[in-house]
Image (cartoon, helix red, strand yellow):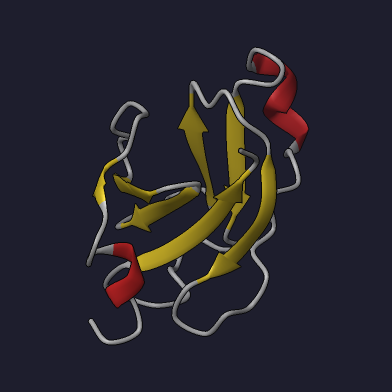
Amino acid sequence: MEKNAASVYGCGAADYPKPEWGRLTQKGNKLYAHVYECSLGIVVINDVDKKVKQARLLHDGSEADITPPWFAFHYEAGSHIFINLKSSRLPHEPVTVVELLLEE
């Protein structure tokens, strides 16, 4: 909990639909993706109306890869965020939290 505290304390429910793979919390322009499972290594946040300025794994501060995958063309342009966790195993179990700094 110590490493992911910023994603809980002072945060509320996000303004975006609940994803199948976990939960979303939000504080101002910071969106937190609480990933409980990622069977393909890529998680998608749907219906996002803002661009991501920065993405990082909260537990260690390392940069998170938000490069659209090869199948991104199946999604409506500009309304999704793709987070590539590079494997089906979460980098920080039991929950990996990705902090996304959104444009205001």
30, 94: nearer the viewer? 30
As displayed, is residue 82 above or below residue 58? above
The picture quadrant where one finds residue 78 is top right
As displayed, is residue 44 above or below residue 77? below
For the image, the number of numbered tags is 0
Query: For the N terminus, which image quadrant?
Result: bottom left
Q: Position of residue 18 (x, y in %)?
A: 28, 32
Q: Residue shown at 42%/47% (left/top)?
A: 28
Residue 19 in sight: yes
8, 62: nearer the viewer? 8
Residue 38 in sight: no
Q: Residue shown at 52%/85% (left/top)?
A: 60
Drawn side of residue 47 relative to residue 32, left or right: right
Query: For the C terminus, which image quadrant?
Result: top right
Q: Position of residue 41 (x, y in %)?
A: 54, 54
As displayed, is residue 15 above or below residue 30? above
Drawn side of residue 48 relative to residue 20, left or right: right
Drawn side of residue 41 relative to residue 18, left or right: right
Q: Position of residue 19 (x, y in %)?
A: 33, 35
As displayed, is residue 36 above or below residue 72? below
Q: Residue shown at 69%/58% (left/top)?
A: 65
Q: Position of residue 102 (x, y in %)?
A: 59, 44
Q: Residue shown at 66%/16% (left/top)?
A: 74
